[in-house]
Amino acid sequence: MRKSLKTGAALLGIGMMAVPLIGATNSTTASPPDSRVLFDQAMPSNAAQKEVTALLKQIAARARATSQHAAKLESFARGRDLGFQTHAYELNRASDTINRMGADLSRLQELRAEALPWQQMVINRIQPMLSGMANHTTEAIESLNANRGLLHSPEYREAIGNVSDYADEVRDLISANVDYAKAQERLKRLESDWATSDPAAYAES
């Protein structure tokens, strides 16, 4: 990442707030679990697990939207002809999307005990990423409020860049694991069909 994390939240001049996500765990301190164990059951089999998958996909879509907002803000910060209100409007949109992801994460935490192992892993790993996204949005808000006449400051541009980085990481992490789960389920179905059609050949393999 381009900058260390900070905590806190600040109101933007026209009224939105980035909610800091608490209780985040550092996923880099633990050894990565064996994917064969995590994906032993790949696809959801009950209502809670299906809701978890739907929420993860929703967060991925919102992370993609946040990345697009951040890209616009980075473009604004490189230019010279856009005023505070233009920046504030787009930053509010990013903040609102991040708040919605925070609500999604709260629901995921409620469902975590019933989730599949790979879903639990993804929930754990996106917690600090969403926290980082919210914190850097707060930095951008604070910088924008404090320097309305200096909309191209390095601090503001760096904060926006960090929001984009985190959004891309969240999107990529969720997409990779959801796609892998689908691939594992297809493989199991193929193996099952093969074993059913020719048990002797499957046993020899």
Image: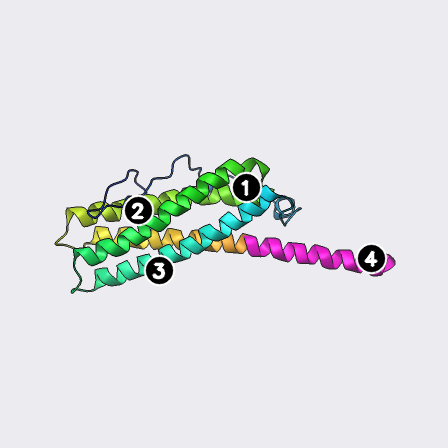
Give the x, y percent position of residue 165: 37, 54
- Element type at marker 1? helix
Q: Quadrant of the C terminus?
A: bottom right
Residue 195 placement: quadrant: bottom right
What range is drawn magenta here?
178-203
Is 199 left, or right, of 166 in this rendering?
A: right
- The answer to which of marks 3 and 4 sits earlier in the sequence is 3
Amino acid type for the residue under numbered disc 4:
Thr
Mark 2 — residue? Answer: 136
Q: CA distance from mark 3 to mark 4?
A: 48 Å
Could you say where residue 180 lies in the image, as x and y percent from the top left?
A: 59, 55
Is residue 195 or residue 84 the one in the foreground? 84
Label 3 belongs to which residue? Answer: 68
Residue at image position (47%, 40%) is: 107
Q: CA distance from mark 4 to mark 2?
A: 54 Å
- Kindly identify which residue carries mark 4: 196
Q: Residues within 10 Å of mark 3 (few under 14, many from 20)?
A: some
Please state the horizontal and vertical placement of residue 132, each as a whole percent of the image. 36, 44
Q: Which residue is mark 1?
A: 120
Q: Are marks 1 and 4 in contact (CB under 8 Å)?
A: no
Is residue 8 shown left or right of residue 185?
left
Classify mark 1: residues with Cα within 10 Å, few (<14), some (14-19) or many (20+): some
Q: Residue at x 22, y 63 (%)?
A: 78
